[in-house]
Amino acid sequence: MSIGRKIKGIYQLFRVELPFAAGICVIAGELLGIGSHISFYQILLGFLSGFFISSSALIFNDYFDIESDKINTPTRPLPSGKVKPSEVILLTIITTAIGLVAALLISLIGFSVGIVFWIIGFLYNWKLKETGLLGNIMVSCSVAITFIFGGIAVGQPWNKIVWFFSFIVFFIDLGEEIGSGAMDEKGDKKRSSKSIAITKGKDYALRISSGLFTVVIVISFIPFILQWLGIPYLIMIAIMDTIIFLFTIKLLRSKTPKEGRLYLRLIYLGATVSLIAFIIGQLIA
């Protein structure tokens, strides 16, 4: 096998936009906790923790999903033969180690939260994914923890704005998880999954997913209305809500799983880009 094909397989395992989003959420949590008075060291460790702990869960997910991926996405690294199962396990160990060491350098509390974050990811990949909604909620909680982890990293674990953003991210990810279940319906049946799409139907799952994205749009204005955050936040949230709204409509009208996955990915990326814009605004303010 060529080196280029191997590198491509490893890159696909990471699903880079997702762990990148986790790292960005940690930084956002740090900024929401203490504002622009944040050191490069805090930013770096926060990002590395979020990125690599999230990566380890995503990489290990492919190990458990190899049978369903043969049906849903046969081009994934394992079913396509780009990467071996033993290489997936090794990469999981490496990314876990980097993420947890970075968390330990933040604080013991940060390390403890990092371990909880990792355990949730492992349990989801191993068993909880098959439980349907419970599994969706667990993985969404692990994503929402990234903001709280950011607050912990700067000594602000109970900051109300940090927790509010955690709820926002929870609903975005839960909508994405349920929507993805609708796209992966055929392969998930092979794994005996009890996803909403399998128990209630694909259209029902997509309506629930879209409803959760609508909740995000509605509640996203609360920090501005309550004057927790100002105009820069309003601009960011208006951009994010517009992206979510437009691609949610397209998601409901999607004709194929491939098309639906694209719109879900764009919703996720849109929210991430908006957060990056907000972070830059906070840093230069």
Image (cartoon, rainbow, N blue to C red):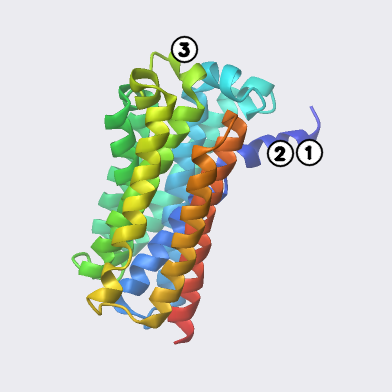
Amino acid type indicated by mark 1? Gly
Residue receiving disc 1: 4
Residue 263 in view of the camera: yes
Question: In which quarter of the view is residue 166 placed?
Answer: bottom left
Closer to viewer: mark 2 or mark 3: 3
Mark identifier at residue 190: 3
Query: Do callouts 2 and 1 mark residues in contact (Cβ within 8 Å)?
Result: yes
Q: Position of residue 182 (x, y in %)?
A: 45, 28
State if disc 1 and disc 3 touch (CB < 8 Å).
Answer: no
Q: What residue is at 44 percent from the left and 46 percent from the top? A: 54
**Residue 165: percent from the left, percent from the top?**
31, 62
Residue at the (39%, 46%) spot, across then down: 173
- Left or right of 157, for residue 281: right
User: Of the residues tagged 3 and 1, which is closer to the observer?
Assistant: 3
Work out whether mark 3 precedes mark 1 in sequence or the reverse, and give the earlier one. Answer: 1
Question: Is the residue 189 above or below the residue 126 in the image?
Answer: above
Judge by depth and name the residue closer to the eye, 217 or 106.
217
The answer to whether residue 247 is above or below residue 85 is below
At x 44%, y 14%, the residue is: 189
Q: First in sequence, mark 2 or 3: give its number.
A: 2
Label 1 neighbour load within 10 Å: few <14, some 14-19, many 20+: few
Compute the Cα span from label 2 to label 1: 6 Å
Residue 69 horizontal/vertical position (percent): 56, 22
Return the residue at label 2: 8
Q: CA distance from mark 3 to mark 1?
A: 31 Å
Is residue 64 toward the left or the right of residue 129 in the image?
right
- Residue at 38% in and 79% down: 38
Secondary structure of residue under mark 1: helix
Task: Check disc 2 and report its element: helix, strand or loop.
Answer: helix
Q: Which amino acid type corresponds to the residue marked 3 in the rendered image?
A: Lys
Badge 3: residue crowd in 10 Å (few <14, some 14–19, many ≥20) = few
